[in-house]
Image (cartoon, rainbow, N blue to C red):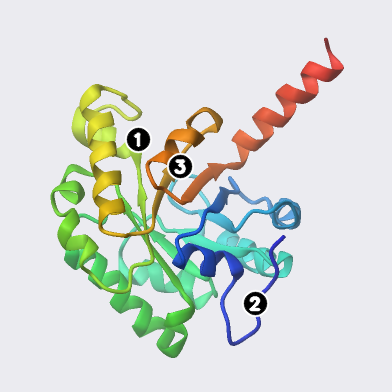
């Protein structure tokens, strides 16, 4: 169970993330504030507020950030853009961290870290910076990206990597899988905190790869729970 942090500290999930311990970031899907307390009580570490893929706008993101704070669950926002003018709006609304897409170069990562300091001042040290590795360019520039100070974790995007490599989201060709394994190995060898999506069947491989940041959509939780409930009730 998580709890809201004292004013001078960070959320427990953020601390676990920085220490390289396993954390669970549940993508809450949309405007679902009522589920946040249940997620916090059940052991989620982050409310992953997805403004890139779910259609959540700024007003809804603000409501979700505040609801997560009340629930004692660390609110991180995945922006739809790496544009500083977009990112700063989530920070102004007290997101405890950002997940930033389209990070292709070291300069992209450095710009995010700089934006944190500009927008948050001394409070920047309490924010979590997570950059996404999801393109061929990001893989090519991974060593330089990893050298940028101030990044807390790296979120590998298998679907977007597949599109960047093969032109098809979700493709699991040998080349795609080898690239994901290569990225994971390089991040692990560099001592970086990283993660990716992993469903129930993929969790063992996720752990073996050295990943600790688990991205998990709420519908995956519901799918398993309802399948088990149906098995009991309708057999």
Give the quadrant of the C terminus.
top right
Residue hosting label 3: 207
Question: Relative to residue 122, is residue 92 depicted above or below?
Answer: above
Instruction: Please give the label number shown on residue 188.
Output: none
Q: Earlier in the sequence, mark 2 or mark 1?
A: 2
Can I make out residue 72 in this image? yes
**Residue placed most toward the observer, 214 or 118:** 214
Residue hosting label 1: 159
Helix, strand or loop at label 1? It is helix
Q: Are marks 2 and 1 in contact (CB under 8 Å)?
A: no
Q: Kindly identify the residue that appears in the image at 60 percent across and 69 percent down.
A: 12
* Cα–Cα span, label 2 and label 1: 34 Å
Q: Using the rendered view, name the quadrant where residue 64 is placed.
A: bottom right
Residue hosting label 2: 5
* Cα–Cα span, label 2 and label 3: 28 Å
Q: Kindly identify the residue that appears in the image at 34 percent across and 37 percent down.
A: 158
Mark 3 surroundings within 10 Å by alpha-carbon count, few (fewer than 14), some (14 through 19), many (20 or more): some
* Cα–Cα span, label 1 and label 3: 19 Å
């Amino acid at each position: 169970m998580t709890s809201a942090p004292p004013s001078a500290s960070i959320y427990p999930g953020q601390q676990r993330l920085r220490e390289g311990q396993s954390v669970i970031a549940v993508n809450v899907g949309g405007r679902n504030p009522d589920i946040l307390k249940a997620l916090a009580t059940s052991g989620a570490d982050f409310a992953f507020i997805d403004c890139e893929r779910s259609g959540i706008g700024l007003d809804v993101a603000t409501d979700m950030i505040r609801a997560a704070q009340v629930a004692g669950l660390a609110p991180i926002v995945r922006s739809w853009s790496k544009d500083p003018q977009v990112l700063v709006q989530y920070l102004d609304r007290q997101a405890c961290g950002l997940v930033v897409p389209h990070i292709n170069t070291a300069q992209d990562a450095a710009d995010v870290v700089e934006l944190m300091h500009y927008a948050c001042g001394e409070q920047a040290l309490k924010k979590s910076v997570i950059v996404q590795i999801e393109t061929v360019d990001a893989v090519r520039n991974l060593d330089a990206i990893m050298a940028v100070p101030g990044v807390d974790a790296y979120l590998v995007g298998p679907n977007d990597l597949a599109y960047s490599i093969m032109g098809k989201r979700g493709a699991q060709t040998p080349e795609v899988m080898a690239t994901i394994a290569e990225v994971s190995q390089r991040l692990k060898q560099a001592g970086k905190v990283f993660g990716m999506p992993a469903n129930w069947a993929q969790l063992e491989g996720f752990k073996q790869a050295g990943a600790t940041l688990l991205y998990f959509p709420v519908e995956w939780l519901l799918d398993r729970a309802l399948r088990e409930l149906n098995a009991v009730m309708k057999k």
